[in-house]
Image (cartoon, rainbow, N blue to C red):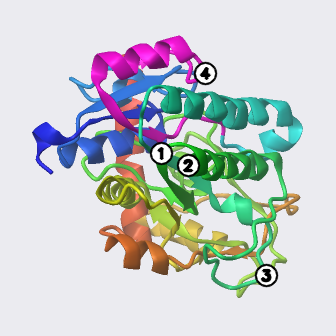
């Protein structure tokens, strides 16, 4: 398919962390792109020059219809939503509104507008406490918090809608997304983020006093929780490959885990941040948080076999170095404004 034959891709939440990387990946692959973002947690500077940005809500059917018509949208990549697990426990209605009800409205608009391809940003949180070492797509989904449930409900909606309407979909279940664009064009910019690597780098740069280690009594080699970290640019590349696969076979929908199949403990991550930044973090040991599994590691075999996906940045120090470079650039951007 040539660039002139490719339909426009609407990226919801395209001014946010993962969405902005997807925009770059789509541009690199020759896809026309348009962004919708309410800019509550997104940033105008994260949207590249020349990419149309509509500031608004994904539940606004009239706005979506206008975007579809004006831009010739043929596919949607849906990243807009709320993502903080503890917040979802404290404010579940926010998550069922932002993640579930708004996704339902977006899917309805896609059906009404004849948009035939839908890629959804889901999460490993749909698995809850898995009872296997490496989580495959067939591992039972038993969410333990409203965030996980809000995403699983959207997965179910997509399956049901695809059975009733001419739409195919890709569900990508993320493990721990980290890092930043290797060219420092975008990265994780939200203030007060809870992701370990971002928090640790902020501490290394003096933006936080310390890093909290929540629990040292997990059933892991060093007692701290183990997670599978995936570079955000590798994740964005998986989205583009998923789109190409959906376009090539209209009868097929795909559900795939996105991770490297390798876990690192909290201690290993903090040691790596010390190494990359050449500083010693102040670590504060605190109690375990409710709902934190001991270990959460993906089995990415289906993603690799189905799409031929091969990660380019599967190295913890590289992930941290890219996140560090972005954090330094972000400080300059904030000073400039």
Do callouts 1 and 3 mark residues in contact (Cβ within 8 Å)?
Answer: no
Ranked by sequence position, the earlier of labels 1 and 2 is 2
Ranked by sequence position, the earlier of labels 3 and 4 is 4
Ranked by sequence position, the earlier of labels 4 and 1 is 4
Q: Is residue 57 magenta?
A: yes
- Residue assigned mark 3: 131
Tag 3 secondary structure? loop
The residue mark sitting in front, 3 or 4, is 4
Ranked by sequence position, the earlier of labels 4 and 2 is 4
**Relative to residue 113, is residue 233 drawn left or right?**
left
- Residue assigned mark 2: 162
Ranked by sequence position, the earlier of labels 3 and 2 is 3
The answer to whether one can see residue 185 in this image is: yes
Q: With respect to residue 15, does 128 lie above or below? A: below
Gap between marks 4 and 1 measured at Cα? 19 Å
The residue mark sitting in front, 4 or 2, is 2
Q: Is residue 194 magenta?
A: no
- Residue assigned mark 1: 167
Tag 4 secondary structure? loop
């Amino acid at each position: 398919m040539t660039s002139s034959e490719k339909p426009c891709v609407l990226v919801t939440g395209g001014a946010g962390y993962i969405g902005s990387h997807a925009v770059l990946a789509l541009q690199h692959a020759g896809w026309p792109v348009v962004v919708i973002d309410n800019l509550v947690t997104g940033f105008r500077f994260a949207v590249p020059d020349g990419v149309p940005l509509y500031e608004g809500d994904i539940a606004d059917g009239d706005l979506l219809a206008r975007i579809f018509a004006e831009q010739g949208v043929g596919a949607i990549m849906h990243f807009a939503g709320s993502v903080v697990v503890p917040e979802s426990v404290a404010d579940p209605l926010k998550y069922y509104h932002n993640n579930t009800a708004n996704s339902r409205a977006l899917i309805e608009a896609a059906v009404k507008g004849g948009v035939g391809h839908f890629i959804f940003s889901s999460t490993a949180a749909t698995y809850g406490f898995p009872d296997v070492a490496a989580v495959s797509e067939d591992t039972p989904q038993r969410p333990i918090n409203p965030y996980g449930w809000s995403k699983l409900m959207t997965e179910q909606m997509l399956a049901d809608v695809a059975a009733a309407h001419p739409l195919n979909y890709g569900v990508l279940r993320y493990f721990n997304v980290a890092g930043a664009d290797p060219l420092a064009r975008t990265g994780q910019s939200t203030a007060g983020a809870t992701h370990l690597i971002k928090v640790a780098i902020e501490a290394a740069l003096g933006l936080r006093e310390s890093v909290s280690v929540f629990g040292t009594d997990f059933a892991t080699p060093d007692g701290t929780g183990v997670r599978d970290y995936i570079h955000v640019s590798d994740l964005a590349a998986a989205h583009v490959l998923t789109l190409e696969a959906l376009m090539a076979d209209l009868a097929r929908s795909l559900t795939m885990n996105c991770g490297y199949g390798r876990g690192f403990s909290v201690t290993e991550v903090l040691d790596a941040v010390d190494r990359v930044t050449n500083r010693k973090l102040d670590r504060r040991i605190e109690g375990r948080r409710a709902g934190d599994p001991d270990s959460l590691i993906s089995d990415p075999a289906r993603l690799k076999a189905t799409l031929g996906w091969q990660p380019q940045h599967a190295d913890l120090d590289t992930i941290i170095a890219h996140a560090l470079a972005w954090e330094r650039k972000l400080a300059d951007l904030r000073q400039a404004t």
